[in-house]
Image (cartoon, rainbow, N blue to C red):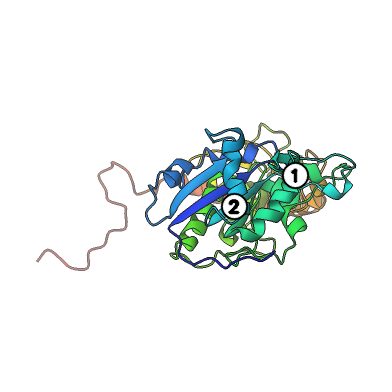
Amino acid sequence: MTTTQMPTALDEVHILWTSEGMSCDGDTVSVTAGTLPSLEDVLLGLVPGLPKVHLHNKVLAKEVGDDFMAPFHQAAQDELGPFIFVVEGSIPNENINGEGYWTSMGNDPATGQPITVNEWIDRLAPRAWAVVAIGTCATYGGIHAMAGNPTGCMGLADYLGKDFRSAGGLPIVNVPGCPVQPDNFMETLTWLLYQAAGMAPTIPLDEMLRPTWLFGKTVHEGCDRAGYYEQGDFAHDYNSPKCLVRVGCWGPVVNCNVTKRGWMDGVGGCPNVGGICIACTMPGFPDKFMPFMDEPPGGSVSAAFSTAYGSMIRRLRAITNAGANKEPKWRHNRRRLTSGYDPRWGNG
């Protein structure tokens, strides 16, 4: 299929969003909680400098049936104009579907037969200015791609190949999370829209095609419980404010910013509210991180080292803390000044 390179500065962009992969629509629902910016602000043109945006998402659309599907068909015929293609849900392997199909969106007007999500990807991805995989199912396969699944599910980059480039010259942009953290997606989308408008440089991605500024650090590095880990002070149940590593938290090895960003308006986020990190943003999720409530392999070793030196640090800090919690002895109401005040000149 041949594609035409689109101009670098766009003043109007469509967002074609399919959640017809193996999906629960949880990423769409999550994004409605975004505030930096909100989806409403983007669609209403309240963010300075962004192109005019038209959203086509079945959960958030007022159109139904053929009216909803019309822009997708137009885009497949190069009749819609510049668009960003957002894929939600893991991609099944339709080569092993027997006589049926795993998932579809709409019907072919000519044959009346369902059009699989794979066919839509084949038609739309090469024509899109940018292609975004939202949520861990679309990025790496997620729950539906775990061991023993019958559908052969995979992530979008597994399907299109990591060397894929959109009509805008971009690789797939992965924004993982189960579901996606709403502002992580909205911030990524805003960057892409500014880039489409010629007002931002190329979006920086890591080797797993994630935005680097969002997924460059671990959960542990931003966690407000990390100080307990350093001091070897671990929780033994889920009611404790201490480090959760020994009760199943994978935070020290997981690329995610939720402990710094929170979930909605800076509030929430798994370890912030007492939940363990189960590594839902990682390519190996869920298989490499199960069973979720067990202490991670290696966690006992690192925790043992931390406990050994941490207990000593904790005691020394307790001594310093006790001293810091006492006022200096010269703060009193007696008749003699004992602060050490010593004027260097006299009254004369």
For label 1, the SS is: strand
* Along the viewing direction, whichever of 122 and 15 lies nearer the viewer: 122
Q: Residue at x 26, y 62 (%)?
A: 342
Disc marking residue 75 = 2
* Along the viewing direction, whichever of 294 and 18 lies nearer the viewer: 18
Q: Residue at x 65, y 35 (%)?
A: 240
* Residue 161 vertical position relative to residue 111 in the rendered view, above or below: below
Disc marking residue 249 = none
- Quick check: marks 2 and 1 in contact, CB under 8 Å? no
Q: Position of residue 330 (x, y in %)?
A: 34, 49
- Name the quarter where the N terminus is drawn: bottom right
Left/right placement of residue 71 relative to residue 209 reads left
Q: Position of residue 104 (x, y in %)?
A: 73, 40
The image quadrant of residue 174 is bottom right
The image quadrant of residue 295 is top right
Q: How many marks?
A: 2
Left/right placement of residue 221 relative to residue 196 reads right
Q: Position of residue 13 (x, y in %)?
A: 49, 54
Which amino acid, by three-letter code, is at mark 1?
Thr
- Name the residue tied to disc 1: 116
